[in-house]
Image (spheres, rainbow, N blue to C red):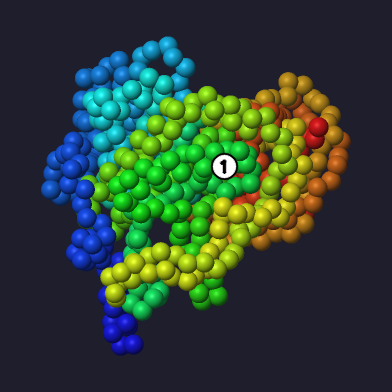
Amino acid sequence: MKHKIIYTMFFLFSLMVEAQLNPQSKKITEKFFPEFKALEDITPALNKKRGFTDYRELMAYLVKYEDKYPEHVTIQMIGESQKGKSIPMVYISNPNNKDKIKVWMQGGLHGNEPASTEALLYLLDKLLTDDSYNYLLDRIAIKMVPMANIDGYEKQDRFAANGLDLNRDQTKLMAQESVALKKAFSEFNPEVGMDFHEYRPYRRDFAKLSSFGITSAFDAMFLYSGNLNVPENIRNLTNELFVENAREALDGHNYLHHDYVSTDEYGGEVHFNQGSNNARSSATSYALNNTISTLFEIRGVGIGRTSFKRRIHTGFVIAISYLETAYEHMEAIKSELAIAQASKADAIVTSDRTVYEDTFKTIDLDSNEYIELETTFRNAGQMQAKLIRERPKAYIISASQEKLIKKLKALGSHVEILSEPTTLEVQTYNVIAYDRDDMPYEKMNRQTVKTELSIEHISFPSGTFIIPMDQRQSNLIIEVLEPEAPNSFVSFGVLETDKGEQLPIYRQLN
């Protein structure tokens, strides 16, 4: 017991000083995560012994390819970071008249996940210089943002300059980077969306598991949405075609993989949360736009440059697999997305994860061997609907709520305006229960509400906003406008309310 306490203290201490002390031993690295030495030293970080690609090196690298391949590469600045640095987006394709599938690729949204950026820079080179891959550009148009969170990346910090986590900001849009990225994504309107990340293989919770703690065994984890407002055919196509092909590609290199899990404590026990259904993060936000969407987590946060080439190669293998799948199945993808967009399914406002017992493959730090850990899973890939409402024909928002409209437009929503006073039969939201968190989350005091719907005839003045639901973003609109939804404008406190109030949002039914 004494030895376990000493080890646990060391484990936790190493997490706190990760910049100076790598918690991963050489024996773990050599046995389970040997370096992929065959990777060419192409990108800026691979051409130096310490550190990662900085902003100056990033821009020089991108401009080099734009100058060399002007017909295939175009750089566009989509906005500025909070510290005033322009955010580059790279358009990559072949200049032919063929019908193309549009693919969005993003890295560096968290500034301390360097292999996410480096994998995209490596991919850029290979798509342009390697005959094994450049054929993909005949049928694919890519928009790539390799360093989405420049300010965080420059100091290898997860957060943006104002302390916000940009992957918790996809509905409330409080950071200017979030707005710039979302506008660029919406204007491109891609069929496939990829967001590259790295994850922490040594977590505080892991020190409590097994005899002397565990570490993650997986080179990559896949995060694709289980949100029930994402049409089922999109969820199935993502998992059964795109993710499955990428799994097979990783198997070819003996890279272990799993659906994404994180840990949390429930009643004093460590449980594994699998998948996600939160619209506040990219995987679900993209999917709610009727996009084939996946967030990739590569094993790397907190271990410096350990296995860095392996991590880059893992991201590259996944990226190529997704591009090959898009290339080979373009017509089927477009057909399935059209079916999804025509869906008139009910709005799922709240839902619960399925909870069950299972085993989880991991590395035991005492024995230095794989073990099957018995644990509790809370799976977002198996959501159970709780609060269901009829999908409206349109949402109506009071003319005074310009802040909400600005965010809806940034999310890509089409908004109409009443040109003259009009009386409509609508459902109103009346707040019958209310609670407000005292502790801010992502700089917002979250609200929990329960509303009661009632039918009223209301005379709306000219200037009132109409958000029709026959648009591609309709499922995302549900997530931000239904007040009980966990990532809505009301839940995040963007629209403040209280018990007894009627919300300035209305539902027009068919």
- Report the residue that reaches farthest toward the bottom: 2
Quarter of the image for the N terminus: give it: bottom left
Q: Is residue 387 left or right of residue 316?
A: right
Q: Residue 433: where, in percent of width, then height?
A: 74, 59
Q: Is residue 448 left or right of residue 369?
A: right
| Image quadrant where residue 135 sits | top left
The total number of labels drawn is 1
For image coordinates 64% across by 58% down, the residue present is: 352
Q: Residue 172: where, in percent of width, then height?
A: 54, 44
Q: Is residue 185 visible?
A: no
Q: Nearer the viewer, residue 482 or 160?
A: 482
Q: Residue 256: where, in percent of width, then height?
A: 35, 54
Q: Regarding mark 1 in the picture, which secondary structure is present there?
A: helix
Q: Is residue 117 above or below residue 452?
A: above
Characterize the local packing of mark 1: few (<14), some (14-19) or many (20 or more) Cα atoms within 10 angstroms: some
For image coordinates 68% across by 49% down, the residue present is: 349
Quarter of the image for the C terminus: give it: top right
Q: Which residue is mark 1?
A: 236
What amino acid type should be assigned to the residue bearing mark 1?
Asn
- Report the residue that reaches farthest toward the top: 97
For image coordinates 39% across by 27% down, the residue present is: 142
For image coordinates 49% across by 70% down, the residue present is: 375
Q: Nearer the viewer, residue 289 or 459?
A: 289
Q: Residue 73: where, in percent of width, then height?
A: 31, 21
Q: Is residue 361 left or right of residue 3?
A: right
Q: Is residue 475 left or right of residue 33?
A: right
Q: Is residue 106 above or below residue 464?
A: below
Q: Is residue 323 visible?
A: yes
| Image quadrant where residue 302 sits | bottom left
Q: Nearer the viewer, residue 161 or 336?
A: 336
